[in-house]
């Protein structure tokens, strides 16, 4: 039987299922303390991290040049926040097309804006 054990950071339950002959996988937002054995999936953590990151940013001004795009650490692309490691691999024609359609915006950190308002 295939089994997915959620919120299982120690890997003990997953190991017990495997010992009984099951195809077991574990999933957690933390790295496993029981060693990164086979069958540990971190998609739950990655998804949570993306949600937390998106909440810290809001769409800023439109990006209209490749130079401006390459200066960014994160951007909003088609309504979602995207990390630099993803968009630096775009082919130039694709990036240029997205820029011309105004599909790309700066990702402005919301905490900085909040801090600035409190200082005034």
Image: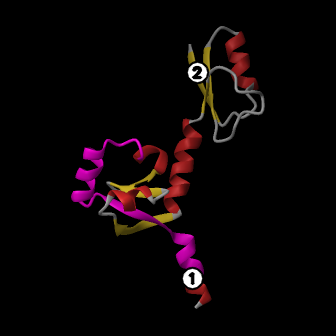
In the image, 80 versus 83, the foreground residue is: 83
Check disc 1 and report its element: helix, strand or loop.
helix
User: Would residue 11 be found to the left or right of residue 85 on screen?
Assistant: right
**Which numbered dot is residue 116?**
1
Are circles 2 and 1 on residues that touch, CB within 8 Å? no
Give the crowd class for mark 2: few <14, some 14-19, many >=20 residues within 10 Å: few
The mark nearer the N terminus, 2 or 1, is 2
Could you say where residue 92 lies in the image, as x and y percent from the top left?
A: 30, 45
Say which quadrant the C terminus sits in: bottom right
Tell me which corner region of the image, top left, top right, bottom left or bottom right, holds residue 104. Answer: bottom left
Q: Residue at x 57, y 82 (%)?
A: 116
Tell me which corner region of the image, top left, top right, bottom left or bottom right, holds residue 61. Answer: bottom left
Residue placed furthest toward the front: 67
Q: CA distance from mark 2 to mark 1?
A: 49 Å
**In the image, residue 91 above or below residue 2:** below
Give the crowd class for mark 1: few <14, some 14-19, many >=20 residues within 10 Å: few
Residue, disc 2: 3
Q: Is residue 64 magenta?
A: no
Check disc 2 and report its element: helix, strand or loop.
strand
Q: Residue at x 69, y 33 (%)?
A: 8
């Amino acid at each position: 039987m295939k089994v997915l054990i959620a919120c299982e950071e120690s890997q003990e339950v997953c190991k017990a299922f495997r010992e009984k002959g099951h195809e077991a996988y574990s999933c957690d937002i933390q790295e496993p303390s029981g060693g990164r054995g086979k069958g540990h999936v971190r998609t739950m953590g990655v998804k949570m991290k993306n949600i937390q990151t998106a909440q810290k940013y809001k769409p800023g001004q439109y990006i209209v040049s490749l130079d401006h795009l390459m200066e960014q650490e994160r951007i909003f692309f088609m309504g979602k926040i995207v990390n630099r490691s993803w968009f630096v691999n775009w082919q130039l024609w694709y990036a240029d097309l997205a820029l011309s359609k105004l599909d790309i915006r700066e990702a402005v950190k919301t905490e900085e804006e909040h801090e600035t308002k409190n200082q005034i």
